Amino acid sequence: MLLLAFDTCLDKTYVVLRTENDILSSDTISSNDKSYHSAYLISTIKESLKASNKTPKDLDAIAINVGPGSFTGIRACTTVARVMAQQIGCKAIGVSSLEVISKAKNDEYIVALDARKNKAYYYDKKLYGAVELEEVDKMISRKKVITDDRLIERFRPIAQEVISYQQADFELGEILSNIAVEKLKTDEGNWAKLMPLYIQPPPVSIPKK
């Protein structure tokens, strides 16, 4: 099996090309002053395939992060994956960013990421969703937490341990690909069922008259 996994939902773009057992290439792209990191998704995919002497037609499956995260990043990920999978005729599967981040510490930590509007995206294997911050404070009290830069100082006094995934050196693209390999053993990988995971509705801006 040849799997392409990519993620533009979080603070970096991750692109991984692998077989079931081996990582062939793993790239991480940060934003720069001129453009958002998701702008490099297509070019990085092309470079990854070329470096491994592969073409899109060689792919058996595509895996992506479907959110929650950047609404623009989620749309970019999902659109590229659906179009590629449909044209190639390969499988496609989505994984939640909350599950990806939780696996960075082998499910030992609760995940609580900033969801704006005084809420956090919360995940602890039993519960996930957008939860009011005051409730999250109670739920993570004296527990180990992975969060982001926006909430780390809020959680530091109440958690047993708190880590920002943005400051840690987690190989999130490779973790995404590992989860996908396991899911594809039981999931049909129908690209038409690949949808963004919007736990909260996208923000709506009203144009000025």
Image (cartoon, rainbow, N blue to C red):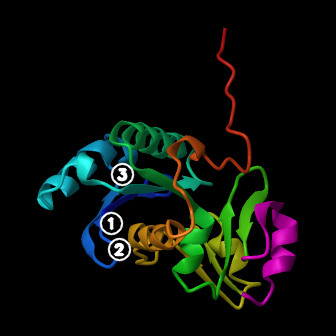
Position in image of residue 205 (x %, y %)? 67, 26
Q: Determine the residue positioned at 52% across, 40% down.
A: 75
Q: Residues within 10 Å of mark 1 (few under 14, many from 20)?
A: few
- Residue 71 x, y percent position in the rendering: 58, 43
| Label 3 or label 1, whichever comes before in sequence order | 1
Measured as percent of width and height from the top left, residue 85 is found at 40, 44
Q: Is residue 17 above or below residue 21?
A: above
Q: Residue at x 25, y 47 (%)?
A: 57
Looking at this view, is 138 or 150 the one in front?
A: 138
Compared across the picture, whether 156 is left or right of 57 comes to: right
Tell me which label, 2 or 3, sits earlier in the chain. Answer: 2
> Residue 1: which disc?
1
The residue carrying mark 2 is 20
> What secondary structure is marked by label 1?
loop
User: Could you say whether the residue bearing mark 2 is in a helix, strand or loop?
Assistant: loop
Which residue does the numbered mark 3 point to in the structure image? 31
The span shown in magenta is 125-143
Q: Is residue 33 visible?
A: no
What kind of residue is marked 1?
Met
The residue nearer to you, when weighing 147 against 192, is 192
